[in-house]
Image: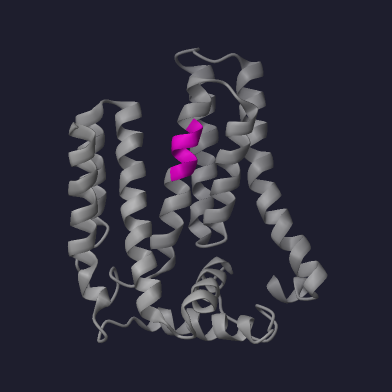
Amino acid sequence: CQSRWINVVIIALVVILRSPTLLPSMYVSDEGYYGTIANDILDGGAVYHTAVDTKPPGMYYIYAAVFQVAGRNNLLAVHILAIFVVAATALVVWRIGARVANEWAGAWAGIGYAVFVHAYRPNDTLGANSEIFAALPLALSVLVFLQGQKKPAWGLMFLSGALVGVATLIRQPSAVTLGALLACLAYGWLIPRSHSFGRVLAAGSGVMIGFIAVIAALAWYYAVQGNFHDAY
């Protein structure tokens, strides 16, 4: 029952704080760039070849998917998706806090994320930007990683690394999380000696291979599409 109320509070906070994005006047310039390239993709274009920007491609594909389902240039649909993504991320942060400490610590962590992710700068933090969408796979990667540490499983570590890879394709600095995960494994081996070297090596290889697999899959797709060299 307590968990249900925490869910309600977190979701309500996100909906209330992001409700201005449902107004027609709420528009951020970055969304225009994403939407332009998304439309180019839907018209048969190739990212970095027929349309160029400095960001990784994840956001363009997210916008393209929304436009494909909800109609071209439907920023309202993008903003609604962003509400779901922020709420889901806050709930995952709650579960991470509960896993690391306890239910109340997790609840405050989730509530804190729901509040402070906005910081209420309407022309910046309320936009459906890359940091909003990258945060969800990053949070999931940490939760999966913690589960993989509790119950050693190479597949969970692979999934954790792959999720970091997905986040990196949305926002480049997300790759730093890969170093944090590997450092956590190294810490467990060097300081409390809670993990053997073999276990750390296996887990670390799973994280790395998962990350590389996602990046390699995109590189292969671009090679087939003919815009691999344009991408870098």
Residue 123, percent from left and from top: 27, 77
182 w.r.t. 175: above or below: above
Where, by quadrant of the figure, is residue 64 drawn?
A: bottom right
Q: Residue at x 59, y 13 (%)?
A: 196
Residue 115 appears in view:
no
User: What secondary structure is the magenta-colored segment mainly?
Assistant: helix
Looking at the image, residue 88 sits to the left or right of residue 210; the answer is left
Residue 61, percent from left and from top: 57, 70
Give the quarter of the figure containing the N terminus. Answer: top left
Q: Specify whether residue 115 is painted magenta.
A: no
119 w.r.t. 74: above or below: above
Residue 4, percent from left and from top: 22, 38
Give the quarter of the figure containing the C terminus. Answer: bottom right
Where, by quadrant of the figure, is residue 127 drawn?
A: bottom left
185 w.r.t. 34: above or below: above
Residue 168, percent from left and from top: 55, 56
Q: What colour-coding does the image apply?
A: one colour
Q: Residue at x 32, y 45 (%)?
A: 91
- Looking at the rendering, the stretch of residues picked out in magenta corresponds to 140-145
Residue 172 appears in view:
yes
Number of marks in picture: 0
Looking at the image, residue 133 sits to the left or right of residue 178; the answer is left
Q: Residue at x 70, y 48 (%)?
A: 213
Looking at the image, residue 46 sits to the left or right of residue 133; the answer is right
